[in-house]
Amino acid sequence: MKTLNKLPILTLIAGACLLASQAASAASYDWSAAGAHSETINGALFDANYTGPAGSGVIDSFERWQANGGGTAGNISEGYNTNANNVLDNKNGVFTHDLLKSSLTVLSRGATNYYVFGLDIDEPSSAPDSKLSIDELRLFTSNNAGWSGNASSLTAANGFNKVYDLGANNLILNAANAPGSGKFNMLFAVLASIIDASAGDRVTLYTKDGVQFKEQGGFEEWAHIKGANGPYTPPEPGPVPTPIPAAIWMVGSALFGAFGFARRKGKADA
């Protein structure tokens, strides 16, 4: 009887663990129910607990976008802030523009400093159309003024330095929890030190929504939260999410397959 070669088994086990790790890192955060929500996702803080003011002295709106640039309900849309007009699904005007690093205000949690951005989704206030999914979110620094390329042009080769990526995760928001324009449905807080250390004098925030729950209303809007000492204190970083059951299932299935393969091979070599 031949001795089983353990290398294929170990290789399959390692592959299973890698797949499980990737699956575990992709999560859907459903914040559609009313109540307090906050998570730490890939190092950034996400929070749905803002109740402060949202006037012109407190926020700086820098990006508005809407399906097909303004009007088709039930669609996926994407946009990023720039001075250029007619980019992706952006709405042209003074509320979509380049954002300078020097204009950002630090908000602190103890000794930790953040730059905080607020998202207002202008969707219907009644179910089922009040939900909207945020499916892609990436933050860059660069020296590119008035950039007008598509989403795939936001690369290091074009001078964009990525400082944050939501990855394969997504968030599900509900406009009914903060109805009307000028109210934030979600805050996005990034360590100020990461942005400050990244080359470039501008900050570009790219968003794609509507893959899971599509747009059914008006435009979506990002604003930078500012003000002396800030009207908002970022929450404590949340716990790392528990791996989803699918990941555990993948490990079990892969291990079962690995040992089944080894057993069959052992019989064939006997």
Image (tube, rainbow, N blue to C red):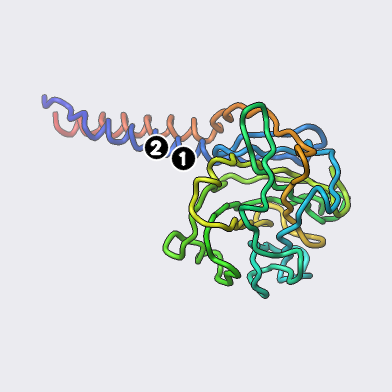
Q: Is residue 255 above or below residue 145?
A: above
State yes or no: discs 2 and 1 in contact (Cβ < 8 Å). Answer: yes
Task: For marks 2 and 1, give the CA distance.
Answer: 6 Å
Nearer the observer, 130 or 40: 40
Relative side of 186 to 55, left or right: left
Residue 7's quadrant in the figure?
A: top left
Residue at the farthest left position: 1
Q: What's the residue at 69%, 50% (across, down)?
A: 133
Q: Position of residue 238 (x, y in %)?
A: 63, 28
Q: Is residue 33 above or below residue 160?
A: above
Classify mark 2: helix, strand or loop. helix
Relative side of 265 to 156, left or right: left
Residue type indicated by callout 1: Gln
Classify mark 1: helix, strand or loop. helix
In the picture of the structure, the residue carrying the numbered disc 1 is 22
Q: Position of residue 172 (x, y in %)?
A: 71, 45
Mark 2 neighbour density, 10 Å: few (under 14) some (14–19) many (20 or more): some
Q: What's the residue at 60%, 26% (across, down)?
A: 239
Determine which of the numbered discs, if any, sits on residue 188 in the image: none
Nearer the observer, 269 or 65: 65
Residue type indicated by callout 2: Leu
Relative side of 120 to 241, left or right: right
Q: What's the residue at 58%, 58% (across, down)?
A: 202
Residue at the farthest bottom position: 86
Q: Position of residue 210 (x, y in %)?
A: 69, 57
Determine which of the numbered discs, if any, sits on residue 18 in the image: 2
Q: Is residue 73 above or below residue 61?
A: below
